[in-house]
Image (cartoon, coloured by chain):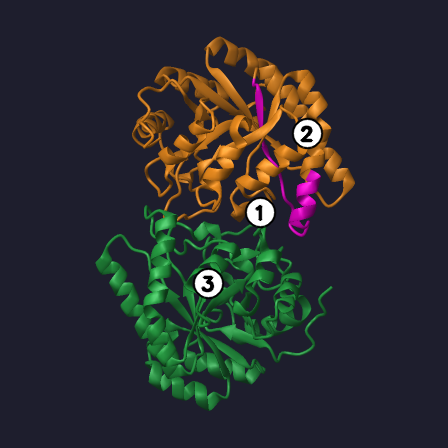
Chain colours: A green, B orange
Amino acid sequence: MTKPLSDHSRLCIHTMTTKPWSLHEAIDGYAAAGVPGITVWRQHLEPTGAREAGRMLKDSGLEVVSLCRGGFFPAHTDADRQKAVDDNLRAIDEAHAIGAPLIVLVCGAVPRVPLTTARAQIVEGIVSILPHAASAGVRLSIEPLHPMYADSRSAVNTMKQANDMVAAIANDRVGVTVDVYHLWWDPDLREEIRRAGDSIFSFHVCDWLTPTRDILNDRGLMGDGCINIREIRGWVEEAGFTGPIEAEIFSNEWWAGDQAQFVERIRSAYLAHC
Amino acid sequence: MTKPLSDHSRLCIHTMTTKPWSLHEAIDGYAAAGVPGITVWRQHLEPTGAREAGRMLKDSGLEVVSLCRGGFFPAHTDADRQKAVDDNLRAIDEAHAIGAPLIVLVCGAVPRVPLTTARAQIVEGIVSILPHAASAGVRLSIEPLHPMYADSRSAVNTMKQANDMVAAIANDRVGVTVDVYHLWWDPDLREEIRRAGDSIFSFHVCDWLTPTRDILNDRGLMGDGCINIREIRGWVEEAGFTGPIEAEIFSNEWWAGDQAQFVERIRSAYLAHC
């Protein structure tokens, strides 16, 4: 049995978890609550721009864990695929500007682009942005998404598919993100986490609610659902990962409430269930 | 490329597809539209009971393809597992009474029963009802469900898992149902359909809508979504299946409209996209 966490030193929160907060409010809120890590979503950079955001983050003393999100490579036309590559190059610049060592890739999918075609386009997209990522000192992480997003968000839907891509690209700068929400049902999860080993770049937590009332924004606080979060953390740690544990909770319900109280609930749930 | 279907001889509709209709209305509506097959959901038997429903179905001349649904075997307590078995025995009696040669199993899942435990309970449940199924002349079909239902509806979420169960049970009376909605994203779909071969007992169609606004009842008419339905039909036929093609569309939107018009739309979509 994996032991409970005894302190908050590995806790990180995604700015999308506290979506109603501006980046400035999130930085202040996390710092005030003793949350040491932050993962920044690109829409939270927009109001100030990445350079000013980078100054705020540096001043805060928070650890910038990653930038969310790059990816969305597949498209029906070459022109749209090039647009996606260009946007990922900008994301790399933003990550560099805010001191984020990692970009999480929601790899993309498009209705009626066959999944096998989409996967080939994803590999090609990642390879094409790798030189720029290398020169910016930024790593790239493939996040498998739940199969309910295979139509329009990601053609990478199992840990095995993500590992196969990492193996095909064969570059130390490319790894995987294990998100319990997307992967808890995966039939090969334990073996494929073991296989991933050092290429596990990040670890996301939340919970699966029954019933799930919204396909996008009804994630649960850890402990409120059915996911074996602590067991999966144990597997990830056995594989060698000891980095941040990132609370990424999209929830219409939590977003409607007080965000500082929500952060406190995350801190408690993190110790009780992660 | 799989050739389009040239007539409606293999079309079957699920009574849940036209949920607002009573069984009597469904029988009349399908017969009037030239739909030769019907799959009956148990709630549509309740008002009249299975015996009277059986008389109506026999008089109609429709082919009764299957009864939906048995299953839901996993539970936290032995008492609840026994209740599930008893309910499945009743379902077998109902199938016998209406002349349905097949019961489709939504195998079940319960939050916080580990998926591996749930799968063992499912196999045990199926094995325990097999003698009664044999004496009633009814076959049982394991339907893998989409992973978004792994919390509360089925711990069987891939074609491989269903095939593995069929192999473990090793009884000709137990096979699988291929439903394109649940399986279109499955990474091993073509190989596992080939592996299933003669144990494919039924084939369900509808489409995956983008966006999907409801996790249960926002299925699309064939052609309105992103599923490669005809290609999957080709794989199922290569494996040897030439039986009914069953339209199983749960849709708040279609249920709100005229059901006779919906049946006509299904007939057109069946020729155009299946």
Mark 1: secondary structure: loop
Q: Chain of mark 1?
A: B
Rendered position, B1 above or below A251: above
Rendered position, B192 above or below B214: above
Taking the spot 57% from the left edge, 58% from the top edge, the residue there is: A192
Q: Which residues are magenta?
A: B100-121
Q: Are marks 3 and 2 in contact (CB under 8 Å)?
A: no
Taking the spot 37% from the left edge, 72% from the top edge, the residue there is: A42
Total label count?
3
Locate the N terminus of chain A and report the quarter of the image it occupies: bottom right
Q: Residue under circle 1? A: B150
User: Residue A202's spot in the image, x, y percent?
Assistant: 52, 70
Q: Is residue A134 left or right of residue B105?
A: left
Locate the C terminus of chain A and report the quarter of the image it occupies: bottom right
- At label 2, counting other C-alpha atoms closer than 10 Å, the crowd grade (few under 14, some 14-19, many 20 or more) is some
- Determine which of the numbered discs, if any, sits on residue A166 in the image: 3
Residues flagged by tags 3 and 1 on a common chain? no
Q: Is residue A273 left or right of residue A209?
A: right
Q: Is residue B220 magenta?
A: no
Q: Is residue B115 magenta?
A: yes
Pair 3/2: label in front? 3
Which residue is nearer to you in this view: B184 or B194?
B194
- At label 3, counting other C-alpha atoms closer than 10 Å, the crowd grade (few under 14, some 14-19, many 20 or more) is many
The answer to whether residue B188 is seen in the rendering is yes
Q: Is residue B88 left or right of residue B21?
A: right
- Determine which of the numbered discs, if any, sits on residue B87 in the image: 2
| Mark 2 vs mark 1, CA separation in Å | 21 Å
Q: Quadrant of residue A197?
A: bottom right
Residue type marked 3: Val
